[in-house]
Amino acid sequence: MTTTRLTRYDRSMLWLMNDRRAAAWYATAARRRLAVAAHLTLTLAIGGVMTHMFLAEGEPLWTVAVTAVLLLPWMVATGVINGATRGLLELRERALDERQSAERSRVLARAHRVTTLLLAATAVTLLIMGGTAGDAPKAYAAPLLIAVLVVHWVMPLWVAGWRAQDEPADDDVVEPGALVP
């Protein structure tokens, strides 16, 4: 950690992100990747329902209810990923050690590259659709750009969750003077 003094908020967030009571949810790489896949799927589902809400004729209230129901497991998946990464993206820089700070930089750089490619693909898609239809598809432009913005917002979380390493097992600690097999 840095020499900057941690605030009460920093200490409470550090404690929360390092709480291992739910470690079984993200103990293995497969479980962490399942949490990322579930989060991605739920994000797509929420985005699809909200797009339907904005593009549908009338005011379908069922979309609001479905969105609210989907948000609960989405928040749980977010918490699982944050726990697996020990709050890599949620903690302030002063609460991270040098290794965590370097990992945060790597995660943000990779997420930035992915979202840059996604933004370019979105722009090309809209240009191609506008060229073939003779007019830009205005009805789909806003939801598509909002979707890309949401992906840009959560991509670092997905990358961090996907890249998170297993915790070292306590059995791997060798006592001084012990024979190593």
Image (cartoon, rainbow, N blue to C red):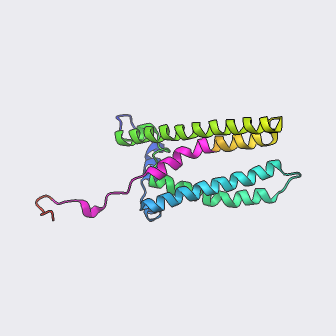
The answer to whether residue 166 shows anywhere in this view is yes
Tell whether position 162 is magenta: yes
Name the outermost residue toward the right: 58
Image quadrant containing the C terminus: bottom left
Image: 148 above or below 34: above
User: Which residue lies at the image location 43% right of the left edge and 46% below the top edge?
Assistant: 11
Q: Which residue occupies 19% across, 60% down?
A: 174
Q: Is residue 121 above or below residue 159?
A: above
| Residue 73 sits in quarter | bottom right
Name the outermost residue toward the front.
Answer: 132
Find residue 103 and report its horizontal and vertical position in percent: 41, 42
Q: Is residue 74 left or right of residue 98?
A: right
Q: Position of residue 167 (x, y in %)?
A: 36, 57
Residue 159 placement (x, y as % from top left): 50, 47
Image coordinates of residue 76 in percent, x first then y, are 57, 59
- Magenta residue span: 151-175
